[in-house]
Structures are given as structure tokens and as C-alpha cells.
Image: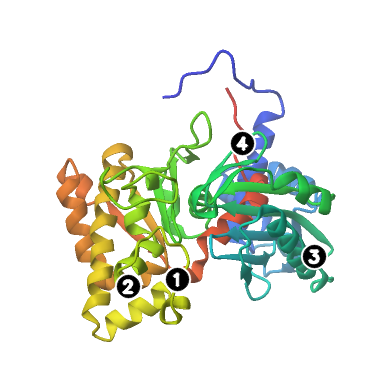
Amino acid sequence: MRKINPKNFKTATRSTSREINRQIALTLIGTHQPVSRADLARLMETNRANVTFLINKLLEEKLVREGATGEEFKRGRKPTFLHLNSQQRCAIGVDVRATRTYLMLTDMIGRQFEDIISFPTELNPEKFIETLSRRIQQLLQDNKEISICDGIGIVVPGMIDRKSSKVLNAPTLHWRDVNLLKPLEEKFKDIPIYIENSGKACALSQIWTTRADIYTTNDLVFVSISDGIGVGVVINGELMRGKHNTAGEFGHVPLSIDGPPCACGATGCWEAYVSNLATLSRYFGRGSSERRPMSLETAGFTVEDLIGRARGGDGKALAALNSTAHYLGLGLASIVNVIDPSRIYIGGEITEAWDLIEPTVRLALKDRALTKESGETMIRIVPASEHPRLRGAVALVTAPAFAAPMVA
């Protein structure tokens, strides 16, 4: 049960139930489209008059469109099928990483329009903003047939101030108190811009997915492994933020205070053991604090290359992956002991080796979990092809239309 905060609450009004029903209708249309008004009334367990009123409003707002007509087995008019109106509207997702930044253009239900594009990430914020702006402008220019861009969602591997959207601290980018929002708003005056932590965005990508397995899960954790580690936590269907919007920073919980240096300035952080940079450094025998490879051999070497070598019989590559797997399991144990989620989602390039590393991850998790049940927490791998960080960035733009209103 949730206690009402006497200093921060929202009272129900005559329009509250209508607003809730509107969001339910949008969600059901998105899940079951194409769907007729009669079927929607059955799904909502209400009468067709109520549904007709809701749909007429959604048609006026151009959030829903009518499609083809179907066959009616009973006497009466043929049903007209309803769809979410994703035509001629788009959202742009931006995934900022320490090495490269990725952009994806989608419609308003997250369907990808064209290939993902990327460019090297400039660590100088001013240069980064210039490059990003130029790439977004080019993306819109190349898709002139899309008349409306509903927003740009940007995910960053760092802590974000929720009021100002300022990047408070992004260790792998070496950014502190960086304001991306204001200069971008000046360049894109008519397009809303949203900025979020990458781990939280990955969790959002799972909340707003249309996969059937998510609807039975109200408590989940997403662990995103790339140049760093991002963690997003969902409790009772809501993203956990904390007072300062920094909840879920498990990547900077130490596994050992005498461990390797982390980009945040501390030592022994979980991220310093499990990130892609840590895995590659382990293989090449270099310190993870050296962000850029120093030799021609390692300059273009990726975790995918390492996995390929491990599958090809390179014992050193397999040992590096299993070492990372061990530390991954230890960190997951901390998460299940603190959060006790129904399910953990893991994304990132290293998941391509899940068949190689899963036994090691499971063993470390079971060794450190406080109960047998916690040690058997369900883990689902989210393949890189699903682009959870970019999907989360897009959800920053598209999800508010479907979100349940807060009352009390």
C-alpha cells in the first residue's frame, strides 16, 4: 500500500476517470492493432458508447487513425479498424557512449525508419553538441516526407539532474555539470528534447515494450554493459529515481576497495571489473584506466572480436570473458539482495557470449545471494539487435502519451 503524501498529492477531478480510460484505450490499441471499436469495448469491459466517445477525441487529437474495414458476421455496419497514428510523425533516439554516439529515427510506436547511424563521441561538450546537432539536422533533412518530429530523446551514461536535465557526472565521458539541453533547445526550437540516464532508459525500454512477457512483471532491473555499466530499477511498474535522480548506480558500488581504478575516481567499482573496457584490458593485460588502445593490434579490437576469438579456441579470450562473468554474477547478487526483482534484463555486447558465460554468472550469483530463491532470479538477455538504449531514448518521447496519470 502507498501512503498519500499530505504535501505532494493530486486530487481526482471529474475528468480523471476519462483521462485514465483514454490512456487505457491508447495502450490497448497499440497492443492489439488493428482493432475495431466493438473489440476495444470488450477489451475495456465497457459499452460501445463510451468507446466511441473516447475514440472520437483520440481521432481529433490525431493520436489514432482509422484503417480498413472488416467483415461483420452479425447484422450491422462493417467494423472500421483502429490504429495508432504513427504516420508522418517521428521521434529521434540518441545513445551517447564514451566511444561512439548512435542515432535512430522511428515512428511514434517505435518502429525504426532506417539504418542506425553513428559517429565518434567528442569528449569536449561544445564540439559534441555541434556534431550531434549537425547529424540530427541531416537526419531530418533526409526524411523530409515526415512532417512532424515529436521529440528528441537523449540517453547519457551518467547522472542527470531531473529539473534542469544537466549532466551532473558522466565518469566515462569525463563530464561534470554539463548543460546539453539549453544549447540543443536553441538549435531545435520547435522540438521537445528529453535527457535521461542510459540505465534508466534501458529499463524504460522494457516497460514500454509490446512483448507479452513484460506485462506480468512489475519489478525488474536492467543492467546495461558497454563502456561502463548502467542500471535501471523498476518497482511496482515505476522507474525508481531517488531524491536526486541517482538511484540505481550499482555500477559504482565497490566489489573491493583495493580493486582497479574506475573512471569515477574511486577504486574497485563493479564497473571497473565488468565494463567492455575492463574485459578488453584484462585480455590485453592493460589497465582499464587507459581509455584508448595504444597499439595497432588493439586499436579496432572490440568485445565482439574477443568473443570470436573465444569461440575459435583462444583460451586467453575465454578466460577474460569468464573472469568478467564471475564479477558480473557478484554484482547481480548485490542487486537481488537489495531489490529482489522478479526479473533481471541484461544488455550489451558481452551478452553475445551468454552461452559461454552463463554458468559462471549463475554460480557467482548463487554463491552471494542470501536465499536460494534469490539465487535463482530469472535473467533475460536483451540482444544488441533490440537496441535497448536507443529504444529507451525513443520512449522518452513516445511513452508520455500512454502513461497512467498520477492521482493521490
Rendered image coloring scheme = rainbow
> How much space separates mark 2 and mark 1, taking CA atoms?
10 Å
> How much space separates mark 2 and mark 3, taking CA atoms?
40 Å
Numbered disc in front, either 3 or 1: 1
Residue 222 percent coordinates (x, y): 42, 52
User: Hey, what amino acid is under mark 3?
Assistant: Gln
Q: Is residue 168 left or right of residue 268?
A: right
Residue 46 percent coordinates (x, y): 61, 42
User: Hey, what amino acid is under mark 2?
Assistant: Phe
Residue on which the image places disc 4: 162
Mark 3 or mark 1, earlier in chain: 3
> How much space separates mark 3 and mark 4, taking CA atoms?
26 Å
Residue on which the image places disc 3: 137
Badge 2 vs badge 1, beta-carbon distance below 8 Å = yes
Badge 3 vs badge 4, beta-carbon distance below 8 Å = no
Most extreme residue toward the front is: 294
Badge 2 vs badge 3, beta-carbon distance below 8 Å = no
Q: Quadrant of the C terminus?
A: top right
Q: Quadrant of the N terminus?
A: top left
Badge 4 vs badge 2, beta-carbon distance below 8 Å = no
Mark 4 or mark 1, earlier in chain: 4
Most extreme residue toward the top is: 6
The residue at 76%/69% (across/down) is 139
Residue 77 visible in this rendered orientation of the protein: no
